[in-house]
């Protein structure tokens, strides 16, 4: 891959509530698919009040998040050691492999989060409570 350029508005918006096998029921833009990235996953997630990505972990992926709009309550850390952090626009946070993380939108309008995951592998969410130390 050399380079690609795409504007957010030119990336198709997908309503995950229409995709039965993929929770949660949020809207996303799959920027990675539009750009053809090979080494990382890149998504823009849109949240309505009260929506969340539940506490989970990945076996291989490190995930970096950037809050673009709205106020979120983050749940971060290994099972039994979780911390809750209130975060708003301009906040970055990261979760390494086998580290629990999740976030709930606590704002009143719309929340927007940019999520980057690497390596770009299919790495479904794991229950952090079931991971061995």
Image (cartoon, grey):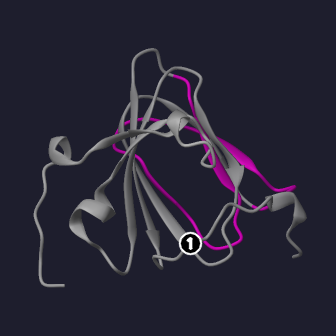
Q: Is residue 96 above or below residue 78?
A: below
Residue located at (69% from left, 62% from top): 57
Task: Out of 81 and 37, give the one closest to the viewer.
Answer: 37
Q: Is residue 97 above or below residue 30?
A: below
Q: Is residue 103 magenta?
A: yes
Q: Does the magenta stretch include residue 122?
A: no
Relative placement, left or right, of 76 versus 93 is: right
Name which quarter of the figure residue 35 lies in: bottom left
Q: Quadrant of the C terminus?
A: bottom right
What range is drawn magenta here?
78-106
Residue located at (39% from left, 73% from top): 40
Q: Is residue 124 above or below residue 119?
A: above
Q: Which residue position is annotated with label 1?
A: 122
Task: Out of 53 and 29, give the one closest to the viewer.
Answer: 29
Q: Quadrant of the N terminus?
A: bottom left
Name which quarter of the figure residue 85 lies in: top right
């Amino acid at each position: 891959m050399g380079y690609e350029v795409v504007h957010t508005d030119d990336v198709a918006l997908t309503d995950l509530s229409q995709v039965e096998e993929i929770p949660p029921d949020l809207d996303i833009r799959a920027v990675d698919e539009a750009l053809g990235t090979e080494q990382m996953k890149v998504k823009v997630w849109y949240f309505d009040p009260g929506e969340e990505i539940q506490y989970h972990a990945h076996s291989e992926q490190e995930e970096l998040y950037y809050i673009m709009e709205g106020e979120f309550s983050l749940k971060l850390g290994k099972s039994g050691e979780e911390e809750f952090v209130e975060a708003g626009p301009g906040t970055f946070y990261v979760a390494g492999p086998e580290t629990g993380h999740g976030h709930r939108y606590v704002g009143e309008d719309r929340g927007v989060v940019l999520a980057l995951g690497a390596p770009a592998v299919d790495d479904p969410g794991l229950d952090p409570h079931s991971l061995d130390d």
